[in-house]
Amino acid sequence: QSVLTQPPSVSGAPGQRVTISCTGSSSNIGAGYDVHWYQQLPGTAPKVLIYVNSRRPSGVPDRFSGSKSGTSASLAINGLQAEDEADYYCQSYDKSLSGWRVFGGGTKLTVL
Amino acid sequence: EVYLLESGGALVQPGGSLRLSCAASGFSFSSYAMSWVRQAPGKGLEWVSSFSATDGSTYHADSVKGRFTISRDKSKSTLYLQMDSLRGDDTAVYYCAKEVGSTVGYFDYWGQGTLVTVSS
């Protein structure tokens, strides 16, 4: 059970917008720690999608965006495409945990 | 181009030991924190251990503290994870990851992973 809570699954049709939430507490996101997001396609290693809350690495389409407010963060995907079907994870720090680094439980995105 | 290549994964009996290696190239290995992240079959990502670039400090998740030890050899640009007293719930794909960021670091490059199976 991670201290960062994500919905186990979300779904959407091609072209739609979906959002994935990452809910924390005052010891992690609420303490001001940045949030990062990763995409893991089936059978592959994770890849950073959004870093420092809302920044996109080069090569990541601008359909992907991130935001943070209070004790939560969100990943939004606009213009959903079939190749977006993957697992998505948020990551941050938690000052109550040994080593501080923590991932959310992950969200499976299904493109209908 | 940054490359991270893990090796050392195997089938091991409960209570046994294993050492994972991660050979790095394409960047200044000694300048970046490096971490191990694992993923049990069908489960999510779990941070395991990190090696700080600034002062050589090491950090371990509570689930592995006292059993796993992270280390590095700068001369070989290689990260290690010594895993002792292995248990069934240590079964996972173990990823090596390069970490960047001055406050809350994130993992900008990942290896392909190496599978550790703990079973009798």
Image: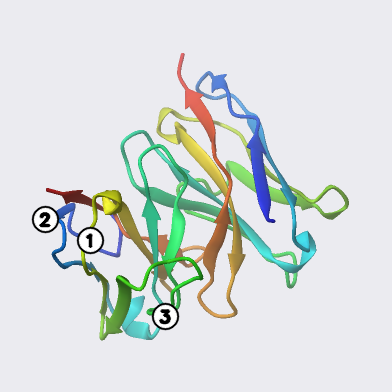
Q: CA distance from mark 1 to mark 2?
A: 20 Å
Q: Is residue A9 above or below residue A78?
A: above
Residue at 67% over, 49% down: B3
Nearer to the camera, B43 or A95? B43
Does residue B70 appear to the left or right of A18 in the view shown? right
The subunit letter for the residue under badge 1 reads: A
Q: Earlier in the sequence, mark 1 or mark 3?
A: 1
Task: Give the structural element (helix, strand or loop) at label 2.
Answer: loop
Is the same chain shared between marks 1 and 3? yes
In the displayed structure, would residue B21 be above or below residue B52? above
Name the kind of residue labelled 3 in the image. Tyr
Can you tell which mark lies on residue A13?
A: 2
Between disc 1 and disc 2, the foreground one is 2
Which residue bears the numbered disc 1? A6
SS for dot 1: loop
Q: Residue at x 18, y 49 (%)?
A: A110
Seen at 52% across and 30% down, the residue is: B115
- Can residue B84 be seen here? The reply is yes
Alpha-carbon neighbours of circle 2 within 10 Å: few (<14), some, or many (≥20)? some
What residue would you read off at disc 3? A33
Crowding at mark 3 (Cα within 10 Å: few <14, some 14-19, many 20+): many
Q: Position of residue B32 (x, y in %)?
A: 70, 66
Mark closest to the chain's N terminus, 2 or 3: 2
State the residue at coordinates (67%, 34%). Answer: B19
- Do the residues indicated by labels 2 and 3 lie within the same chain of the protein? yes
- The quadrant of the rendering that contains the N terminus of chain B is bottom right
Q: Chain of mark 3?
A: A
